[in-house]
Image (cartoon, grey):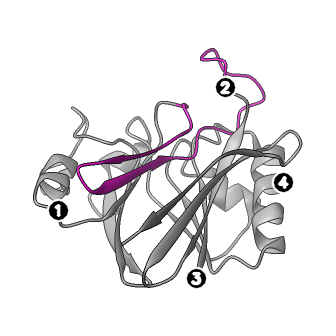
Amino acid sequence: MKLGVISDTHRHIVNFSKAVDFLQDRSVDKIIHLGDDYSDVDELGERGILRVPGVFSDAYQDAKIPNRTVENYGGWRFLLSHTVSSHPNDLPGDLVPEDLIRDKRVKVVLYGHSHMPDIKLEHGIIFFNPGHLKNEDKKGFPPTFGYIELTIADLLVRLYNLRDYSIFREEKFRK
């Protein structure tokens, strides 16, 4: 199975579209948008992109829209969240990332918010932030997006630099 992971598009629709096109050319099964800006998916007109809202989005305060979800892809349990931890804007009843991580109810945490692309393994949990898709960012990172290829036993996580589609970083994990 192949997943595309995007976060923090911040109304940069052209960059968002380029990342989606690149991922679709690699025949991803699902594209995930981790928030900021939730409505960019609508503007792009893409169907089937799974999304969660950013913590400052109006959608985040809509109880009918899940702020976080747990999804099972290829036998791996993923937390999809804009933030890696709880946030003051969380609603009652929102999933609590710290609980899911502590109790090892997820194996992979996909998150955005910080605009800092990262792949790491901590306490047996894989954390993946695909970065942002802004043209420039004050934290100094180029626009990046993610790709995950997984089997029942292995997970390949890759960050791509949007500017030239080079691999920014890559890690491989075993279950």
Q: Would you say residue 20 sits in the magenta stretch?
A: no
- What is the span of residues highlighted in magenta in the rendered image? 115-140
Instruction: Give the camera-side residue of 25 and 104.
Output: 104
On residue 141, the disc is 2
- The mark that comes first in sequence, 1 or 2, is 1
* Residue marked by disc 1: 104
Residue at the image position 43 percent from the left and 80 percent from the top:
153
* Residue marked by disc 3: 1
* Residue marked by disc 4: 18
- The mark that comes first in sequence, 2 or 4, is 4
- The mark that comes first in sequence, 3 or 4, is 3
Task: Give the residue type that dot 2 points to.
Answer: Phe
Are there few (<14), some (14-19), or many (20+) residues within 10 Å of tag 2? some
Picture coordinates of residue 28, whole percent (x, y): 68, 76
Task: Give the residue type that dot 4 points to.
Answer: Lys
Disc 1 and disc 2: Cα gap in Å? 30 Å
Instruction: Give the camera-side residue of 62 and 80.
Output: 80
Which quadrant: the N terminus?
bottom right
- The mark that comes first in sequence, 3 or 1, is 3
Q: Are marks 3 and 2 in contact (CB under 8 Å)?
A: no
Between label 4 and label 1, give the one nearer the viewer: 1
Disc 2 and disc 4: Cα gap in Å? 18 Å
Disc 3 and disc 4: Cα gap in Å? 21 Å
Which quadrant: the C terminus?
bottom left
Judge left or right: residue 128 versus residue 43. Answer: left
Disc 4 and disc 1: Cα gap in Å? 35 Å
Are there few (<14), some (14-19), or many (20+) residues within 10 Å of tag 3? some
Instruction: Give the camera-side residue of 146 and 36.
Output: 146
When asked about the image quadrant of residue 52, the answer is bottom left
Residue at the image position 44 percent from the left and 41 percent from the top:
57
**Main secondary structure found in the magenta portion:** loop
